[in-house]
């Protein structure tokens, strides 16, 4: 049997109010960002959907590769310095998609950014320095073309990408700039600033442990034809093997012959015998040449574990991305259109809300007022949840989400109607209003739970299986369904029960929406006096009498009824 | 409004009753005609798929000052493929081309902007690769199948498998009609349309679940009596929920209509409008099918059950006897069989029974007798009052 309906409606209401206040305080705590994150279709900007393809046909993309790809793209996008730019993955394996959203920018810049394969260069190392910046005052004193080019690269990359120093020739000014470079700052270790291979370069090591001064590149990344992580011949530790095309092989032979004769790096010698592998302005690895390499095949040794060896091999092989990326969808919305769409969505929502409210008020009168209040609370709760989810899991509200919210107005109103109609049915059966509030609820509750479960199921399945705009819609649909239940359980029902205790409603005013006369039940006074119940029992007895009078089948019905009562 | 309430109470009490279940032939024929049109449109006209599904590029140019032919010339010269140019009521020009690479689309948006006197950054661009659409569609289909399997399991557990089938039939009915309307009128199918269709899934099932829940309640322990058949009990449930169905349909359609009005008036074609049109059609179909399709299908499935067959026979036998008794006793007026003969036109006509059907009063009584749970709160409240 269903558990008894709430007899203490005040408690549910207080629980809801506490929840609301808690949520509001948390979401709108001063000093934190409490705005709703808008999708690009509502604020303008560019969204690019990329589908990663495995480099080797027929293989599966691993989660690791996907994560690595996203990491690299994110570093580049962050380099734009646009707040709220985001890179997300949807799905996994070979059916994964990477969604890059950059508000406020046109398609040209974003597409160029994500499609670019990172620049990989091999440079002879001039010298290795400690990662700490050396008094910047010295650097200021020295200004020349080095300082200029440093500024250039900074403005090029934006605020968030690694700082590098480049100059056409080695000069004291250039050295001073490099000295001032801060390799403790994590921004400078993230990369994202492609370097010019024909110029000198000062850049940080990936780990932030060293700072390198490097000569112009002797091999560019495109010359690498293959790279693999392998166990050493002794079977202890890992190495990375490299293969070059003929041009690369020639350059390698020349450079290695020259460099391997030089003194060890770190001893203060300039130049020294290492070469640096530079990716997007960060030194990924700086192995030293042990001997001249003449065959176009090199092997990088070091204290690699398997992960490090694989990562390095991947960097060498794919530039940076462990997968190739197909641009499958570009959507670029101007800020004007975005604003228009947002406005249209809000207007449509308000009109929809107003129409539904008017209808509910006309049809259900005072009860309709409860419904309209419930809708208002549901709307507030939805806004609150959207803010909270914007903050916590980075939910962005898209046009499809707005549409979902508008549709939800009707679906939320549905649940009130199911409840109210149930109550009316109970009144028609001759119940008192107090009883109808509760017994109608017990029945409506079951229906609501079943029906909302189906909607929630749809939302969850859609969310996990779809890509792009459908996902945003599914999230809002699921959210509004949960809110629908919260409101029905903690607001609408308690309020109806509280109102049902008031004289106005009990008297069955025709404005109450629950006038038993009009509903065809017994008059209110009747009901209060409990006469109807007596009357009903009479009805019931005469009905069973009727049944038994007829035939044996009638007996069964009578018996069944008796057993039940 | 008051008259609706009035009808509502008469429907509830069974005083006014429409034979939704018994007249199944009528509804089936009506639905069959619509479904035929829908399927025919799909087969012969096909769907007008948006670029999101077939691949292509779409440029929306606000306040374009160029002519349609100028824009088309520029686009066709650059892409070397067929280009469709339309102008929406809001003055926004849409240029749709064959699939482009990202470099080509950047170039074209610049030249379109140049011709039409609009900055390239003001142009809304969408470029979709030719295989991407297929991927979205296959994902959506995959989701649909998984959802249907899950929902069938849920309905089979919560109700019974016959109700799951009835709900799925109603659902398929709504989906085919919605998609058919798109084919018939050549409306463009976009991802927003797909979202709309998926919402209909949830909505149609929600409606059916509400009606079935009432059927389930009305038919609890029905095999243990002989006053009414399953068909009649199910029909009473539909009648009792019909006012709710109308109300919920209206409240659901009102916001959707608001979207259509605002979408068409302010924006021209767009995501909101695409979504709303699919929803409006689907919701209307969903309401119709929950009343006219889902329950008759269920009743027909139930009729195959041995217990329900036995019940039908028992009810029929009892009614014959009652009729005989009435005939011998003359019109004493007091008994129920006489009543039912009196307002037989309004009463539920069981499709399987030929004898006079249960009178509304009888149905009401039965419903009261069956709801055993009601006795509990009643006693409790009585105690409270003391």
Image (cartoon, grey):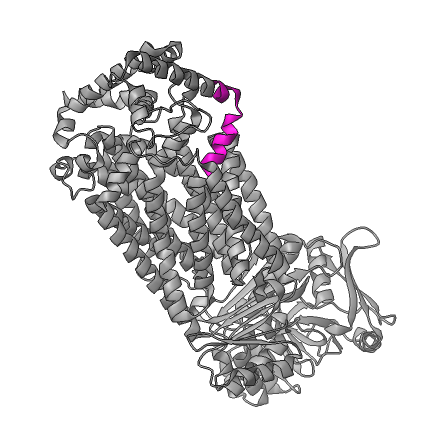
Is A475 part of what is drawn in magenta? Answer: no
Our reading of the magenta stretch's main secondary structure is: helix
In the rendered image, residue A461, in percent from the top left (x then y), is placed at 52, 46
Residue B68 at least partly seen: yes
In the rendered image, residue B293, in percent from the top left (x then y), is placed at 47, 40
Total labels drawn? 0
Taking depth in this image into account, of A431 and A226 the one nearest to the observer is: A431
Q: Residue furthest right?
A: A295
Taking depth in this image into account, of B154 and B243 the one nearest to the observer is: B243
Residue A440: quadrant of the picture: top left
Q: Is residue B148 above or below residue A142?
A: above
| B232 displayed left or right of A152 | left
Q: Residue at x 37, y 65 (%)?
A: B262
Q: Residue at x 83, y 52 (%)?
A: A234
Q: Residue at x 57, y 48 (%)?
A: B143
Q: Is residue B38 above or below residue A513?
A: below
In the rendered image, residue A48, in percent from the top left (x then y), is placed at 56, 67
Residue A400: quadrant of the picture: bottom left
Is B304 part of what is drawn in magenta? Answer: yes
Q: Is residue A273 above or below residue B27?
A: below
If the image is split into quadrants, where does the C terminus of chain B sit?
top left
Magenta-colored span: B293-310
Residue A183 at least partly seen: no
Q: Residue at x 67, y 83 (%)?
A: A199
In the rendered image, residue B359, in percent from the top left (x then y), is placed at 32, 25
């Amino acid at each position: 049997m269903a558990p008894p309906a709430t007899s203490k409606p005040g408690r549910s209401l207080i629980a809801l109010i506490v929840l609301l206040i808690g949520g509001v305080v948390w979401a709108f705590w001063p000093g934190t960002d409490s705005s709703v994150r808008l999708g690009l279709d509502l604020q303008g900007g560019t969204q690019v959907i990329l589908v990663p393809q495995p480099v080797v046909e027929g293989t599966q993309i691993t989660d690791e590769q996907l994560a690595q790809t996203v990491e690299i793209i994110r570093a580049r996008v962050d380099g734009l310095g646009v707040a709220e730019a985001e890179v997300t993955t949807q799905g996994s394996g070979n059916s994964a998609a990477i969604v890059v959203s950059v508000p406020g920018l046109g398609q040209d810049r974003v597409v160029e950014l994500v499609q670019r394969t990172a620049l990989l260069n091999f440079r002879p190392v001039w010298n290795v320095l400690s990662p700490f910046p050396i008094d910047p005052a010295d650097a200021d004193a020295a200004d020349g073309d080095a300082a200029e080019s440093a500024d250039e690269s900074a403005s090029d990359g934006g605020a968030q990408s690694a700082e590098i120093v480049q100059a056409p020739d080695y000069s004291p000014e250039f050295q001073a700039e490099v000295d001032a470079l801060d390799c403790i700052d994590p921004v400078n270790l993230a990369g994202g600033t492609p370097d010019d291979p024909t110029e000198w370069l000062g850049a940080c090591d990936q780990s932030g442990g060293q700072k390198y001064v490097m000569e112009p590149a002797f091999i560019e990344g495109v010359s690498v034809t293959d790279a693999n992580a392998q166990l050493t011949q002794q079977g202890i530790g890992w190495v990375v093997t490299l293969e070059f095309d003929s041009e690369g092989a020639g350059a390698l032979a020349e450079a290695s012959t020259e460099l391997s004769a030089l003194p060890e790096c770190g001893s203060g010698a300039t130049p020294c015998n290492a070469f640096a592998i530079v990716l997007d302005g960060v030194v990924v690895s700086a192995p030293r040449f042990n001997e001249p390499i003449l065959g176009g095949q090199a092997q990088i040794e070091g204290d690699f574990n398997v992960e490090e060896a694989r990562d390095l091999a991947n960097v060498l092989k794919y530039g940076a991305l462990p997968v190739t990326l197909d641009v499958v969808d570009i959507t670029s919305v101007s800020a004007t259109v975005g604003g228009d769409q947002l406005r249209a969505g809000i207007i449509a929502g308000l009109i929809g809300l107003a129409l539904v409210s008017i209808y509910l008020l006309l049809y259900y009168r005072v009860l309709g007022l409860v419904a309209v209040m419930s809708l208002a609370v549901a709307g507030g709760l939805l806004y609150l949840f959207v803010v909270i989810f914007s903050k916590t899991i980075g939910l962005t509200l898209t046009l499809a989400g707005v549409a979902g919210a508008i549709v939800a107005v009707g679906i939320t109103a549905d649940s009130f109607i199911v409840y109210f109609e149930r109550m009316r049915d109970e009144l028609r059966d001759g119940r008192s209003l107090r009883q109808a509030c509760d017994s109608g609820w017990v029945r409506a509750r079951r229906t609501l739970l079943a029906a909302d479960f189906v909607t929630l199921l749809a939302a969850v399945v859609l969310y996990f299986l779809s890509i792009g705009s459908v996902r945003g819609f599914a999230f809002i649909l699921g959210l509004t369904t949960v809110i629908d239940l919260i409101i029905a359980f903690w607001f609408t029902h308690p309020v109806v029960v509280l109102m049902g205790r008031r004289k106005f409603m009990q008297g069955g005013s025709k404005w109450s929406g629950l006038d038993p006369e009009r509903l065809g039940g017994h008059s209110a006074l009747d009901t209060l006096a409990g006469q109807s119940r007596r009357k009903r029992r009479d009805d019931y007895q005469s009905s069973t009498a009727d049944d038994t009078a007829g035939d044996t089948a009638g007996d069964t019905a009578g018996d069944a009824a008796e057993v039940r009562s | 409004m008051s008259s609706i309430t009035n009808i509502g109470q008469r429907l509830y009490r069974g005083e006014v009753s429409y034979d939704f279940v018994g007249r199944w032939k009528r509804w089936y024929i009506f639905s069959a005609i619509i479904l035929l049109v829908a399927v025919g449109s799909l087969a012969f006209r096909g769907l007008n798929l948006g670029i999101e599904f077939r691949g292509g590029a779409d440029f929306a140019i606000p306040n374009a000052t160029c002519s349609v032919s100028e824009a088309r010339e520029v686009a066709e010269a650059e892409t070397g493929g067929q280009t469709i140019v339309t102008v929406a009521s809001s003055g926004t020009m849409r240029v749709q081309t064959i699939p482009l690479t990202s470099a080509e689309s950047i170039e074209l948006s610049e030249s379109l902007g140049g011709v039409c006197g609009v900055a390239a950054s003001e142009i809304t661009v969408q470029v979709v690769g030719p295989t991407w659409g297929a991927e979205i569609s296959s994902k959506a289909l995959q989701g649909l199948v998984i959802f249907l399997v899950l929902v069938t399991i849920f309905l089979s557990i919560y109700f019974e498998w016959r109700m799951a089938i009835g709900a799925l039939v109603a659902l398929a009915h709504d989906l085919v009609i919605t998609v058919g309307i798109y084919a018939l009128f050549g409306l463009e199918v976009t991802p927003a349309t797909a979202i709309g269709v998926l919402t209909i899934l949830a909505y149609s099932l929600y409606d059916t679940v509400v009606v079935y829940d009432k059927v389930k309640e009305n038919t609890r322990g029905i095999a243990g009596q002989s006053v009414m058949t399953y068909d009649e009990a199910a029909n009473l449930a539909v009648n009792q929920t019909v006012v709710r169905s109308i109300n919920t349909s209206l409240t659901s359609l009102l916001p959707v209509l608001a979207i259509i009005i605002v979408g068409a008036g302010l924006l021209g074609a767009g995501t909101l409008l695409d979504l709303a049109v699919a929803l409006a059609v689907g919701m209307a179909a969903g309401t119709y099918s929950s009343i006219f399709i889902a329950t008759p299908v269920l009743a027909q499935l139930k009729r195959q059950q041995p217990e329900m067959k036995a019940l039908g026979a028992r009810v029929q036998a009892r009614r014959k006897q009652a009729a005989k008794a009435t005939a011998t006793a003359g019109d004493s007026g007091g008994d129920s069989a006489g009543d039912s003969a009196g307002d037989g036109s309004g009463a539920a006509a069981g499709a399987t029974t030929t004898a006079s059907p249960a009178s509304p009063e009888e149905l009401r009584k039965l419903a009261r007798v069956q709801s055993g749970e009601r006795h509990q709160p009643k006693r409790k409240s009585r105690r409270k009052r003391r």
